[in-house]
Amino acid sequence: MLTMQDALARLTTYWTEQGCLVVQPMNTEVGAGTLNPATFLRVLGPEPWHVVYPEPSVRPDDSRYGENPNRLQTHTQLQVILKPDPGHPQELYLGSLAALGIDVAAHDVRFVEDNWASPALGAWGLGWEVWLDGLEITQFTYFQQAGGLNLDPVSVEITYGIERIIMALQEKTHFKEIEYAPGVSYGEVFGQSEYEMSRYYLDDADIDANRRLLELYAGEAQRMIDAGLPVPAHSFVLKCSQAFNVLDSRGAVSTADRAAEFARMRRLAGEVARLWVDRRTEQGLPLGTITPPDAARPAASVQTADGERTLVFEIGTEELPPSELRSARDQVKRLLTEGLAGTRLGHGEIRVFGTPRRLIAVVAAVAAREDDHVRTVKGPKRQAAYGPDGAPTKALEGFLRGQAMTIADVEIEEINGVPAIVVKKHEPGRAAPTVLAAVLAQVVTGLRAAKNMRWNDPKLSFSRPVRWLTALWGDDVVPVAVSTLAAGRRTRLLRTAVPPHADIDSAETFLETLGVNGIVADHEDRRELIVIGAQDLVYPDGKIDVKGEAALIDQITDLVEQPLPLLGTFDESYLSLPDAVLTTVMRKHQRYLPVRDENGALLPMFVTVANGPVDVELVRSGNEAVLRARYEDAAFFYRADLATPITEMKTHLNRLTFTDRLGSMADRAGRISALALSIAAGLEIGSPVLERAAELLKFDLGSQLVTEMTSLAGIMARDYALHAGEDRAVAQAVYEAELPRNTGDVLPATVPGALLSLADRLDLVAGLAATVGLPTGSSDPFAVRRAVLGLLAVHRSTPALAGFTLTEGLETAAAAQPVPVSAEVLAAARDFLAKRLEQVLTEEGQPIDRVRAVLLHADRPALADVLLGQLTSAVADPGFLAVAAAVQRARRIVPAGTVAGYDPAVLKEPAELALHEAVTAVPAFSDVTSFVAATQGLVGPVGTFFDEVFVMADDPQLRAARLGLLATVRDLGDGLLDWDHLRL
Amino acid sequence: MLTMQDALARLTTYWTEQGCLVVQPMNTEVGAGTLNPATFLRVLGPEPWHVVYPEPSVRPDDSRYGENPNRLQTHTQLQVILKPDPGHPQELYLGSLAALGIDVAAHDVRFVEDNWASPALGAWGLGWEVWLDGLEITQFTYFQQAGGLNLDPVSVEITYGIERIIMALQEKTHFKEIEYAPGVSYGEVFGQSEYEMSRYYLDDADIDANRRLLELYAGEAQRMIDAGLPVPAHSFVLKCSQAFNVLDSRGAVSTADRAAEFARMRRLAGEVARLWVDRRTEQGLPLGTITPPDAARPAASVQTADGERTLVFEIGTEELPPSELRSARDQVKRLLTEGLAGTRLGHGEIRVFGTPRRLIAVVAAVAAREDDHVRTVKGPKRQAAYGPDGAPTKALEGFLRGQAMTIADVEIEEINGVPAIVVKKHEPGRAAPTVLAAVLAQVVTGLRAAKNMRWNDPKLSFSRPVRWLTALWGDDVVPVAVSTLAAGRRTRLLRTAVPPHADIDSAETFLETLGVNGIVADHEDRRELIVIGAQDLVYPDGKIDVKGEAALIDQITDLVEQPLPLLGTFDESYLSLPDAVLTTVMRKHQRYLPVRDENGALLPMFVTVANGPVDVELVRSGNEAVLRARYEDAAFFYRADLATPITEMKTHLNRLTFTDRLGSMADRAGRISALALSIAAGLEIGSPVLERAAELLKFDLGSQLVTEMTSLAGIMARDYALHAGEDRAVAQAVYEAELPRNTGDVLPATVPGALLSLADRLDLVAGLAATVGLPTGSSDPFAVRRAVLGLLAVHRSTPALAGFTLTEGLETAAAAQPVPVSAEVLAAARDFLAKRLEQVLTEEGQPIDRVRAVLLHADRPALADVLLGQLTSAVADPGFLAVAAAVQRARRIVPAGTVAGYDPAVLKEPAELALHEAVTAVPAFSDVTSFVAATQGLVGPVGTFFDEVFVMADDPQLRAARLGLLATVRDLGDGLLDWDHLRL
């Protein structure tokens, strides 16, 4: 059996053979290998660096007394830094797995998007978690920034989680059972330390002492920075970090502390980084500097066909995130379409496909050459071209010389009405490969992602590295060259293929060649393979909810090139865990499809989709082990939570920050509860259920399970509340308080739930609007848009709230914030709500004019809803249309500022007197329906009035009275509808 | 080339193959691998443990900014723990060197005594430095105690100094040049850190912050102990240690702090150790317990000869310290002699030999059997043996039954004058092997050293492990068995021999067999080989001072089994270093013999003595490299010292502790100077030279070179003072202040030097007598005896001091101590001085009676000296003898308490009147010579008086006058000599 120490030795040896040097772990506690100066300092600056080292990584927060089978306060990382990116780091990494004896062709090894950032270090990078049969075994990151400095060159950081890898390889279910060395278990070596250090971190560390340590460390760090000594300064920054983590795990970090500490550490780390770069520069960069790879030379331009041929262009990447893949496909299509439009090359349909590792454009019937073309070049005006003697002037001669033409080529054309010399140049169309090379190059350089990174290419930037280009027009290579990449006819296959690449004969056979090698280029084809395969696997015992899981299936589809659905099972006993726990783990953590029986109950099975031809039994059992471990984890947390009084969980909210300026989660829960109770009081809909639910609100954020799986907030609250013997209605209310969690989610069904949900979202909007600001563009980190949509939906769906105005709610919420919320901010928030309501209602299919007509009731969405419904009926009513037309006509005629009032005695015409009477007789109304009824008597008189009365009489008194009468008509229904917007 | 990281990997792999597990270095700063819990905690208790790990070891005090070629603030240890001792750890260790590619047969690998102790950890062990061609590359220790707990089983601790090994193997002269990884130097990886951490430790660490850190760490350590958590507690003890080391390297540790901190750390470490043992015990010792090796079964007892044969008995050990070897030989001889004397086995001469690895007893002509023997067993008294009827009583019958005898065997013998029953048992002598087995076993168990250790044998204890026994009587194995060892005929040869053992045919061929295999058993033979070999090597260029280096040669002789003298050279440029520096390095550090020309000037060469047949060129060049590095070190320090003002060096004395209670070295130097000046003032022999020398006194203790080589104190003071432009006489005085450094050393030649030397030793005696006490038995850690001998020698050799009394000196010194010095202590100190003077004088050959006669002048040894000389002449003078006899006779006759005074008028006899006149006429005298002259007139009268006068007259008045007259004679010379002791 491969022991843990063997694994460390083998990996170390492997990377040494790849040119890495070996250093020792840091001799002060660190949370990750990244913090070791062999990473944090050495990734800075232009010097090369290749290193491998183990790093016992201390995470006080992960302390579990050694009881949790998968979580340790100290776990062992093996850290590798490759600087610069060698260009094929994924392949090197797979080699390291092989060195561990892992058959990467038999297993399902996957690179699953994971972006890493450490705000406290001013560091981030893009990359992946590496999955081995569903188990995360490695973090693989292209390190982009450290200490706030952009890294140039970028480093590849590979961090192996050794305990996890070994547990998988040794098939152990508890870390203590790992065979660490022959005959010696991990538990025997480290078990005592796990228990005791957990005790220290969770229970026994002296808070005051650690606070003082933190201050002393920070002081020394700053002093060393001032002395220009980055190495000891860095060591003290690490000590700060550990002291902070200890305080945090002891629950002793206040909101203010956390923000201040992160800011301080980020500043110190930044100064350390700058100093280090300075020192290395002063020393003349002893390890030398990295020469970026040379620019590629394009393939020779050869054209062997003269008819139309297919163009295929493949951009080979490292695994793109599914979320980027769709956008990338669209970009390729747009860039290519525009690029070709800028040429005179005839072509047919442009289709674009994508898999995680490639973007493929296929363009039908691309002509062999551009169309020929005549270009007119304008010369001097005719007047200036010939002298009085008719002889060409020097101006004309110069022009002709410049254009390499003769006097015989001269023509005269009228340009802007003035006759001028022109010459016409016949330009033959360029050959397709030449034209395409330029267009395709721009497609590559034009690609952008939501988050872009750099790699060893000195000029490119994209979501993940672009590693190869394949470009064929018919049988010929299109001589594209972009920075270090030159296109050829070679494509890459699955990494486990033998050989892992293929040479393509012609563009026409490209997709076929991929297909023969198992790669399904088209998203829809892959999706269908997955759906059908999964359904077949579970038939007849269970079903896949293909519609309900559509988003997940789409994501899975873009995680594989050659989908291979596999059925796995898990122990039935786990079905005793809440349904949401089971499915959250499957969907979010593992991208497994849940399987249900015909009643919708979960079955103890799942479908996972491997990539390519794997050893099915091996991958199945690997995934089953991962799920078992995750369920074991969840069950562990669940049991622990059930053993914790819910009031105690609630106290944990003091330790959770909402935002730096808006206090802890406990603060926020308190504000929400108060707001909900105040609204209820105003509406006289308070109840003991609401009061108890308000007390408990959000308590499950203090549970271990929700800490692990935040998406279960609310669901676990209901579960734990029921287990704790709370009233069923109370449990339901704390659950509903979190609804809706996203668009289309269920809404609160009870009044207490709705009140809490509404108050939650009002608090969120008021607080964030005043601090981070309302969302603009695509950036909405706190999901304020989603909250507002929820707010509107809850109001609309809860009749009891109909009388409540959101404006009032926002004002009350604003007054409770720990920061001032200005009137401008509140106005902006109201406006934001109204805009969202407009959007929702139009998306529901309501005509925009009617939507806008009711939008003055945006702060009572339920009312707006009612009015909009009535309006839909009313617009079919001629009476309403007539009154509405009169109102609108009156609005047009009556000058602004005219008061709705007049002296009836001045009126004399029968029509106006009739209108006066009808207007006076209009009874009170409260909505569109009653408005229609109330104004029925007006229909006739108002029509007659407009037909017979000349409003703008010469007599000023009379004119004023008539205008006053009309203003009264104008104001009919004021505050009910925004008549200006209504198109009838 | 073997890179440093390769070396670490190879050693790790080697030890893993021997069953060690691999752990990571400690994630808090430690000074040595021993502090890692994988050693400190795991050596405790009865569980087995085998581990190997690297440990970057931080020694703030060794910070040199990366400039010193051989010294680093962080060096890399590779630590191995073997628990239990596997029985052949040295051989396993040599295997590890082979794994590094070191040809241990070609190199000179030696185990050189080194005893390790860490008072702060309550830990100690015995073992060796391992030398590779003179270079210390490893510490090898049998760990005996940790945290104040005795270790059972004992662990073997092997600590490789990786940088040193690699520098040797790569032939680098500066650590920065080490090839750490292919193409990457050590300096490139660690150079910046060396510089910056040196800056922190030496210059920039905030003292106040580190003091507070120390207190916080100690507080957390104690809290964790109170919480019963040894693991975090240990971690905080380590942090304490590092904070303390930082303070120390910043020069911020006061005497009181140091003592208190060591005590605190020792206490904390002890509590951690006890807690750990408790925890492991509570857990049922998860790793199991170690079964000690079985007791050995002795060889079958076979006797094939019936005549006298030689007995040879070899006790095979691991390398004994030279200082223990002589004592061990003596013990074997004594134990064997006594043991054989307790038998009836005839034998001839007993000879005992010893090498570092064996003690050999050879006994000539050992008889085949003991002599036969009659043993008399006493029974009841005759009276009780027979009844009145003459029949045997029950008592007699019982006795006979018990002895298995009959009534016929009964004899009567008188015992203590009472007739009693006896029986005589004829006991045949036992066979030689049987007799010898018992005797030899007792030799082994009886061995004791000054410092004893335990190893894997459950019953034995000695200076170093006993690993084998060889015992032959003639051709036969003597069936000795002691604990786990059974003797056989196999002896072990040099470890590099092939095979490394030999079977001996007969005792008579034993020494020959050893000799044939190169091993020279006899110390004198080895010594001669060394002396002759060394002289041959240097002839004719230079000479070895065989007499001057006798102690060193003796030591070298006991470091090897097969001496192979080698000549090495060093660069002439190093001859510019002071002679004492060069020879101290050669003798003390390297055990090399210096080579001088005929004028006594050092030549740039040395002789080292390898053990066994090595590759001469390899070993020579290795030793040359070591010496070069050491001289480079010394030159580095020397240059640094020369660049430091001597007054600045003197300030460093504040950082050096003398003893906990007696203050710093600066305090001590101040006291000495004041005392010297005060003595000089009293004697009116003060001078500007003395005053300046007193100011500078001991300043060189603050130099780097003397810090490294304390034995150069004084020598470097003179050198540096001269370089600093001090007066030559001043420089000489600060040098002489340290003289004599040992018995037989040169003495101060100048008055200022003598004064300072005397004051130094008076201060030492007064202070230590009052604190640690005067030496008793063999324990004299502060070398007080040597100081007192020096004190006496200086006084005797300095005429200017003759008038000065040591009593007065001690009193003045006592008054200046920071602790009270009681009158009792001062009296004991005077007594101690007197006893040493008596010893010195008798050792110089003076008769004890005369020595004792002058010993009342012990506090003026110079005077005692003079008087003793005069006494030697006087005892040949009949006049002196007559007066002396009279004085002594008067002392006997005159009752105690009789006053020397009388009424001359009462006297009447002529003889007494004549004596009265003669006594009255005795002039003043000041020494023995003037006493003889002064008392010449007394010779006749005193004789006549005793012949003619009856002292005890009846008349009380007369009797009183006569006794008074005699008392006056008695008191003649009182205070000059102690007449009681004088035997004439």
Image: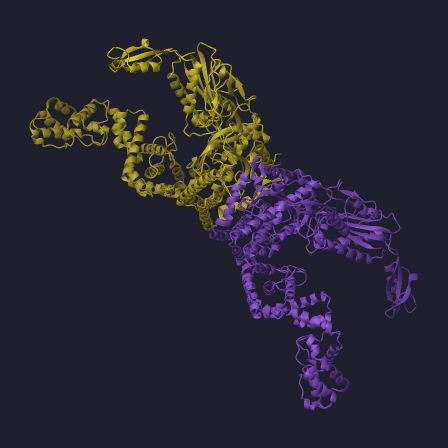
Chain colours: A purple, B yellow
Depth check: B571 or B750 in front? Answer: B571
The total number of labels drawn is 0
Depth check: B385 or B420 in front? Answer: B385
Q: Is residue A425 above or below residue B743?
A: below
**Residue A561 shown left or right of residue B248 in the figure:** right
Residue at (68% x, 91% y) in the render = A905
**Residue B453 shown left or right of residue B91 in the figure:** left
Please say whether residue A252 is visible from this viewpoint.
yes
Kindly indicate the quadrant of the structure image that contains residue A69.
top right
Depth check: A638 or A392 in front? Answer: A638
| Quadrant of the rendering where the N terminus of chain B is positioned | top right
Q: Is residue A464 above or below residue B262?
A: below
| Quadrant of the rendering where the C terminus of chain B is positioned | top left
Kindly indicate the quadrant of the structure image that contains residue B902.
top left
Q: Position of residue B946 (x, y in %)?
A: 13, 23
Please say whether residue A228 is visible from this viewpoint.
no
Q: Position of residue A653 (x, y in %)?
A: 54, 57
Q: Which residue sits furthest front?
A: A599
**Residue B557 shown left or right of residue A348 in the figure:** left
Q: Which residue sits furthest top?
A: B408
**Residue A865 shown left or right of residue A249 in the figure:** right
Q: Position of residue B199 (x, y in %)?
A: 51, 47
Q: Position of residue B905 (x, y in %)?
A: 7, 31
Q: Is residue B210 above or below residue A760?
A: above
Depth check: A982 or A464 in front? Answer: A982
